[in-house]
Amino acid sequence: MGEASLQFSKGFQMGGAVLLTRKIRPGLKYQFGMYYNKELFGNFFLPLLGIDWKINDRMNLFGILPGYLTYEHRLGKKFSWGANFRTFTTTYRLETHGTAYADDYLRVQDNQLGIYTDFYIAPKIVLNVEAGHTAFRRIATGIEGKSERNTENILSERDNLYFRATLQYRLRFR
């Protein structure tokens, strides 16, 4: 991620996750695993803990923490509402234009807590609208390989409101 001219020459980030699922009973599964990504600030490991719980015919709780957790309440075939928690850490390659001490990546860390509504236009086509607030947002630049947070230049640590509207093609597997 980052500037297009650098994507494969200087910007490729290898990563992946391993996730094991344990079915406790019909409608309840737990997941355990590990996430790894070679971020521009260094190796990034995260333990993963997930849940996929069909509470009843109208309510679901699912997600893989620390990445996301979603509560869904279906009001019928056309409408549902719920709450989302998301967190992410991402780095983007920056072009340094040959300067010796220029920062060469942008790091974004964010946590989002929001409420949403879904409107099913067709059985698999969904209009999703979400609004919420960020918490502990941090945007900084740094030099590749320097993993100490105190070597990064902080650009912003301000939280803010967010709004998202998406048109989705959604497949349900249960």
Image (cartoon, rainbow, N blue to C red):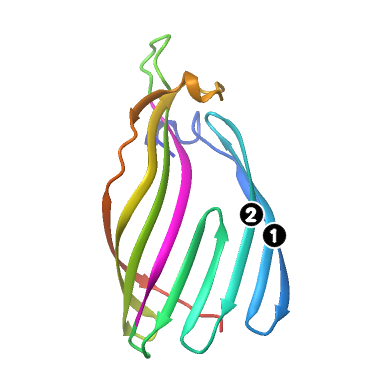
Q: Is residue 91 above or below residue 148?
A: below
Amino acid type, residue under disc 1 in the picture: Phe
Are circles 2 and 1 on residues that touch, CB within 8 Å?
yes
- The crowd level at tag 2 (other Cα within 10 Å; few <14, some 14-19, many 20+) is some
Residue nearest the viewer, comparing 98 with 57: 57
The residue located at (44%, 59%) in the rendering is 85
The N terminus sits in image quarter: top left
The residue located at (48%, 82%) in the rendering is 59
Q: Which residue is mark 2?
A: 48
Q: Is residue 23 magenta?
A: no
Q: In the image, is 171 to the left or to the right of 159?
A: right
Please state the extent of the stretch shown in magenta in the rendering. Answer: 80-94
**Where residue 164 appears, x then y in whole percent?**
28, 60
Q: Which residue is mark 1?
A: 32
The Cα–Cα distance between marks 2 and 1, rounded to whole angstroms, is 6 Å
The residue located at (55%, 53%) in the rendering is 66
